[in-house]
Amino acid sequence: MQNLARTAFLMAILMLISKCIGFVREMVIAGYYGTSYITDSYVMAIAVPTILFGGIFGAVATAYIPVYSKVSEDKGDREGNLFTSEIINILLVLSIISSILGIIFSDQIVHIFASGFHGKTAELTSYYIKITLSYVVFSSITGILEANLQYKGLFLPQIISGYLLSGITIIVVIFSAHTSHYFLAFGLLIGYFARFIAMLIIARKKEFSYTLSLRFGNAAKNIMALSVPVFIGSSITQINTFVDKTLASGLPEGSVSALNYGMLLINVILSLTIGILTTIIYPRLSQSNAQGNYERFGGIIGTGVTLITIIATPCTLGAMLYSKQIIQIIYERGAFDQTATQLTSSAFFYYSIGLLFLALSDILIRAYYSLQDMKTPILCSVVGVIINIVLNLILVRYMAHSGLALATSIASACSTTLLYIMFKRKYKEITIIKSKMMIVKIVVASFISVGLSGVVYYFIIMPLNTFFYIRLVQLGLAVCVAAASYYIILRIMKIEEIKLIWQIIKR
């Protein structure tokens, strides 16, 4: 477990750097375009490829690891490479066809996904979609190459290669701001292509050899069979995104952008917790299941849940308490004015309520997938989507875009709870939570530490100056107070995992 935590910590550092670069990218976009119709069009165009194709390609990448593991171990690396080539070729054909169809019918796609967009907003969104759908070809193949490297124990180059994407995007955003906003979406297309080339070079150095073959063997059929339920589950989840953005497109200008900026911050926290841990844990869970070692399976998933709870709980409370300050520091400059801050901080606050549940749901879903149980997560996702849609239609009337964010958080809490209950009933031999009392202690410690931080911030170091660096230092001091008191309280409560985290930090 120390090796796992050590790798996770190093990944967190690199991921933090990646997210900082990503923040710079978003700050540049916000600074030049604010929450205008251009940003709304750009955000919607980015969401469309994920909604349409992200599910199936992500499902194939998810199902790839357990199948590749069996092929490689039973038949050797040569057959493993051939199998990987088969999957890449299948995705290549599907992605090219899908992109062409999407480009041809981009106007119809805008009408379906952003019915509230009209005039120049709808026209610009259609133009951007033609560009964003083109990078699907590169992103789909990159996903398989990343999964191949993860199984081989290589996790860091994937993160570093993401720097290319953000860096190129920033350059193109600045270029578009000084020339024409029609160039804005080209940054993503060039960035995804550069990332694909980087991952291909790294994979070849790790003994991957590509074969141009359209053979559809048993292994490929197996992965497609496993991918279908995973795709259905992810597609159901994407309905939430579709409903949110569709309803937001009918609200005042900037609502779609505000929701996007708020969720971007939530994704940063998730990437630094659940994204890293599930990336490392998933191959190990698959191996444990193949070996029938459920004690090891439970140990891995239990440690992962505990670490996520330790990190995500205070982050949830802190994000809610300092939602406005965080948005001001990160985004408020240039065209991103106080009105944009108010819109975005409100969305961020309500998204933050469900942060812990979003973090826990992914690791639980991976546990189901490792056991080749694809149906249960689908059922839980359906329940979550129904709850989200019902709450969206109710809350949007009274809370506008904030109601959409709150509905997402409540739905996440419900679906995550259902995931845990179903897992506990179906797999009684696997223990997910080592101690419920330990979870209670973590929650109590989080409330105390974040509450103490709030007292210090609002009554001692409350900002009297709106200067950026002053606000940054003051918020940083408040976070340090929360972190120090949180660590002390957890040590007093004898939460052993905090010692492991401290050892990794010292090293």
Image: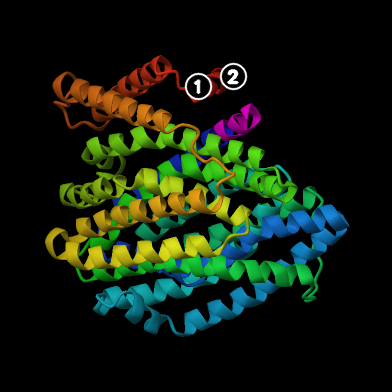
Nearer to the camera, 476 or 304: 304
Q: Residue at x 41, y 71 (%)?
A: 128
Query: Element type at marker 1?
Result: loop
Q: Is residue 131 above or below residue 72?
A: below
- What is the total number of numbered labels drawn onto the structure image? 2
Give the residue at mark 1.
Answer: 496
Q: Is residue 207 above or below residue 318?
A: below
Percent x, y for residue 91? 65, 71
Q: Residue at x 68, y 67 (%)?
A: 223
- Residue 229: mark in rendering: none
Q: Residue at x 56, y 23 (%)?
A: 504
Q: Earlier in the sequence, mark 1 or mark 2?
A: 1
Dominant secondary structure (helix, strand or loop) of the stretch shown in magenta: helix
Image check: 65 left or right of 466? right
Number of residues whose C-alpha sits closer than 10 Å to that of mark 1, classed few (under 14), some (14–19) or many (20 or more)? few
Give the residue at mark 2.
Answer: 507
Q: Residue at x 61, y 58 (%)?
A: 62
Q: Is residue 263 magenta?
A: no
Percent x, y for residue 93? 66, 77
In which quadrant is the N terminus drawn? top right
